[in-house]
Image: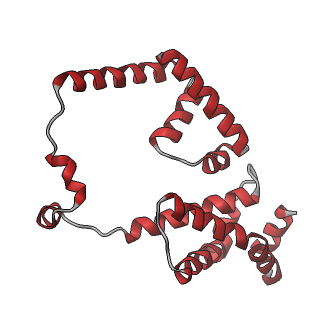
Amino acid sequence: MSTQLLDRCTRGEREAFAELVRQYSALVYFAIYHTLRRKGLILQEDQVAELHNALFLSLLEDDCRRLRLFSGRSKLSTWIKVCAVNLTLDHLRRQRPLLSLDELIETGEPELHPLHKEVEDPETLVGRSESVRRVRELLGTLPTRDRLLVERIYRDEVSGEQLAAELGTTVGAVYARKHRLHRRLVELFG
C-alpha cells in the first residue's frame, strides 16, 4: 500500500500526496514533539507547524527527490519519522547561538565553568584513563557489526528508531541487540 502511494506521489498526483500527509501528519507531529522533549525544549505551536510543513514540502522538492530515496528496507512510517527527527535536530542546530570564546569569557556563560574547576587528583585521572583503556580493549574484541552498533548508540547517541531505519530492522530488534551487547560488556568488564 505505501509503495503504491509513494509511486503515485512521485508521479505528481496531488491526491496521493494529500493522502500521504493525512496518513503521516500525526506521526510527524509526534516525532517533532518527542525530539524536542528529549532535548528539554518547547517550541511554540506555529514553529512546530512550520517544521511539520517543512518536512512534507521537502518530500516534494526537486521532483520528489527525497521520496525517491526511500529504499523500502524499513516501513515508510519509520522512514518518515526519522526524517522528521533529523529535520527537527537540524532546526535546533541552526537556532543555537554562535558566540566567540571572547564573548563567552566576557559574559561568564555557564559552559565555561568546567574550565575553571580544580584539576582532579592524579590517582583519579589514572584510574579513569585505565577504565577508558579497558573499555577500548573490550570494544576491540567485539565483532565489527556489534562494535559499530555500540558506537552508534553510545558515542553518536543515535536513537533506536533511527538505527532500525538505517539497519532495515525493527526497533525491538535493535533494543534486543543493545541489551545483549550491554550485558556482554558488563560481564567482560566485571
Residue in view at x 59 percent, y 24 percent: 183
Report which quarter residue 27 is drawn in. Answer: bottom right
Instruction: Please give left or right for residue 86 compared with residue 102 in the image.
Output: right
Viewer-proximal residue, 188 or 42?
42
Residue in view at x 75 percent, y 72 percent: 10
Viewer-proximal residue, 52 or 113?
113
The answer to whether residue 11 shows anywhere in this view is no
Q: Residue 129 location, x and y as percent?
A: 29, 24
Instruction: Please give left or right for residue 172 compared with residue 115 in the image.
Output: right
Q: Is residue 18 above or below residue 76?
A: below
Residue in view at x 83 percent, y 62 percent: 3
Instruction: Please give left or right for residue 165 compared with residue 106 in the image.
Output: right
Q: How is the image coloured?
A: secondary structure
Q: Residue 141 location, x and y as percent?
A: 50, 18
Residue in view at x 65 percent, y 32 percent: 177
Q: Residue 186 location, x and y as percent?
A: 52, 22
Report which quarter residue 63 is drawn in. Answer: bottom right
The answer to whether residue 3 shows anywhere in this view is yes
Report which quarter residue 131 is drawn in. Answer: top left
> How many numbered markers are drawn?
0
Q: Is residue 42 above or below residue 133?
A: below
Viewer-proximal residue, 20 or 52?
52
Q: Residue 125 location, x and y as percent?
A: 23, 26
Q: Is residue 183 above or below residue 52?
A: above
Instruction: Please give left or right for residue 48 compared with residue 103 in the image.
Output: right
Q: If the image is split into quadrants, where does the N terminus sit?
A: bottom right
